[in-house]
């Protein structure tokens, strides 16, 4: 997948979303549920002192004030259609009174294809 395809996939959920964090202006108007996504480390394929393929760990977090089965089902169907294997971890953040569903998995990032004219 390309970065653009990941962004498009996340945007298709029609929820507020941000890479890594929301800025202060976004936080002022942020409504639940929302998505935070980011890359957390890499597990590159390498040999002979050369990294052949970057394989970052993609994390997508769904935050809600209730257990949001509807959005989870939508997201999981989209992940399946995009052939992304993930682990799912549910948690409750007591101090924030929020549910967090974390999807985490390695993803091969491909380069954007250049358009050709002519």
Image: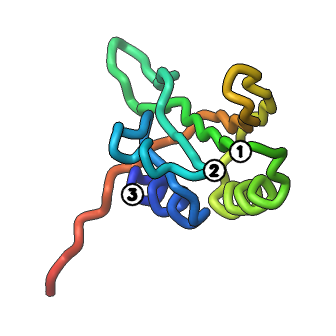
Which labelled disc corresponds to residue 64? 1
> Do the residues under discs 1 and 2 have CB atoms within 8 angstroms?
yes
Judging depth in this view, the residue of 7 and 97 nearest the camera is 97
The answer to which of marks 1 and 3 sits earlier in the sequence is 3
Badge 2: how crowded within 10 Å, few (<14), some, or many (20+)?
A: few
Residue to which mark 2 is pinned: 32
**Tag 2, which secondary structure?**
loop
Q: Position of residue 9 (x, y in %)?
A: 54, 60
Identify which residue is drawn at 55% across, 36% down: 58
> In the rendered image, which residue does mark 3 sit on?
4
Q: Quadrant of the C terminus?
A: bottom left
Label 1 SS: strand
To which quarter of the image does residue 4 belong? bottom left
- Of mark 1 and mark 2, the one earlier in the sequence is 2
Picture layout, residue 46 above or below residue 83:
above
C-beta proximity under 8 Å, tags 1 and 3: no
Q: Position of residue 76 (x, y in %)?
A: 75, 54
53 relative position to 91: left or right: left
Left or right: residue 14 compared with residue 77:
left
Picture quarter containing residue 81? bottom right
Residue 57 coordinates in the image, percent (x, y): 55, 30
Depth check, front residue: 37 or 112:
37
């Amino acid at each position: 997948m390309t970065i653009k395809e990941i962004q498009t996939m996340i945007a298709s959920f029609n929820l507020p979303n941000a890479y890594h964090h929301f800025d202060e202006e976004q936080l002022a108007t942020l409504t639940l549920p929302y998505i935070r996504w980011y890359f957390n480390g890499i597990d590159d394929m390498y040999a002979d002192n050369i990294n052949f393929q970057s394989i970052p760990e993609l994390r997508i977090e769904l935050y809600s004030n209730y257990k949001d089965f509807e959005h989870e089902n939508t997201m999981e169907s989209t992940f399946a259609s995009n052939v992304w294997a993930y682990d799912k971890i549910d948690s409750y953040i007591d101090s924030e009174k929020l549910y967090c569903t974390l999807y985490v998995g390695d993803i091969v990032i491909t380069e954007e294809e250049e358009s050709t004219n002519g």
